[in-house]
Image (cartoon, rainbow, N blue to C red):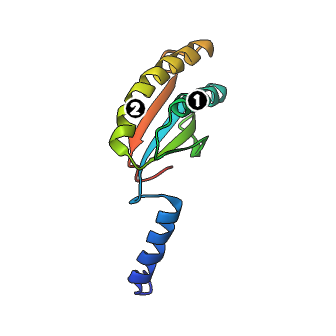
């Protein structure tokens, strides 16, 4: 694009995105779990992964859990899971129910780690502009 051949750049980028199944060929939902205790974050992200995989929908792919690119930010350890989906509304509807279960599990894990109820936090970012 910087060389004035934006058509070539766009064609290559769109081919890559189609092959890798990235937007605009799917939608993304980034789930970020954070806590001051690294073990609590690992446990919560693994449990969230189990919950999400237990009833995965067709056209849905789960990446992670893995440490977030900025794995520690403002004293909090961060892990993330990325959901790719072809069927966005179906995924969102199912995700709402799965996250209710996940919130109960996260609260249980926080108590187990002697953290306050909000000691493990979950953030949901639909169509993230950055995965940092």
User: How far apart, in angstroms, are the residues tagged by discs 2 and 1?
Assistant: 14 Å
Q: Secondary structure at mark 2?
A: helix
Q: Tell which circle, 2 or 1, labels the residue nearer the N-terminal end.
A: 1
Residue at which label 2 appears: 94
Q: Which residue is outermost to the bottom? A: 4
At horizontal 39% and vertical 82% (from top left) the residue drawn is 7
Asked if residue 48 is positioned above or below residue 26 in the image, the reply reads above
Q: Are marks 2 and 1 in contact (CB under 8 Å)?
A: no
Read off the residue under disc 1: 50
Q: Nearer the viewer, residue 46 or 88?
A: 88
Q: Position of residue 8 (x, y in %)?
A: 44, 82
Instruction: Give x and y (percent) for residue 14.
Output: 44, 70
Few, some or many residues within 10 Å of mark 1 (<14, 14–19, 20+): some
Which residue of the protein is positioned furthest toward the left in this rendering?
Answer: 89
Q: Quadrant of residue 10?
A: bottom left
To which quarter of the image does residue 49 belong? top right
Per the rendering, the mark at residue 70 is: none
Residue depicted at 46% across the width and 38% down the height: 57
Helix, strand or loop at mark 1: helix
Rendering coords of residue 109 (x, y %): 58, 18
Residue sitting at the far right: 39
Within 10 Å of disc 2 (Cα), the crowding (few <14, some 14-19, many 20+) is some
The residue positioned 40% from the left and 42% from the top of the image is: 125
Q: How many marks?
A: 2
Quarter of the image that includes the N terminus: bottom left
Nearer-the-camera pick, 87 or 129: 87
Position of 13 relative to 101 (above/below): below
Q: Residue furthest front?
A: 58
């Amino acid at each position: 694009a910087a060389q004035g051949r934006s058509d070539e750049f766009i064609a290559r980028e769109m081919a890559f995105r189609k092959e890798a199944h990235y937007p605009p060929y799917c939608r993304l939902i980034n789930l970020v779990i954070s806590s001051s205790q690294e073990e609590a974050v690992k446990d919560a992200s693994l449990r969230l992964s189990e919950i999400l995989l237990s009833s995965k929908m067709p056209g849905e792919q789960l990446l992670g859990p893995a440490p977030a690119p900025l794995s520690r930010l403002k004293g909090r350890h961060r892990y993330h899971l990325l959901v790719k989906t072809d069927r966005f509304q179906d995924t969102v509807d199912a995700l709402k129910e799965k996250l209710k279960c996940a919130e109960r599990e996260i609260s249980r894990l926080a108590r187990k780690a002697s953290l306050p109820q909000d000691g493990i936090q979950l953030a949901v970012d639909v169509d993230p502009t950055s995965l940092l």
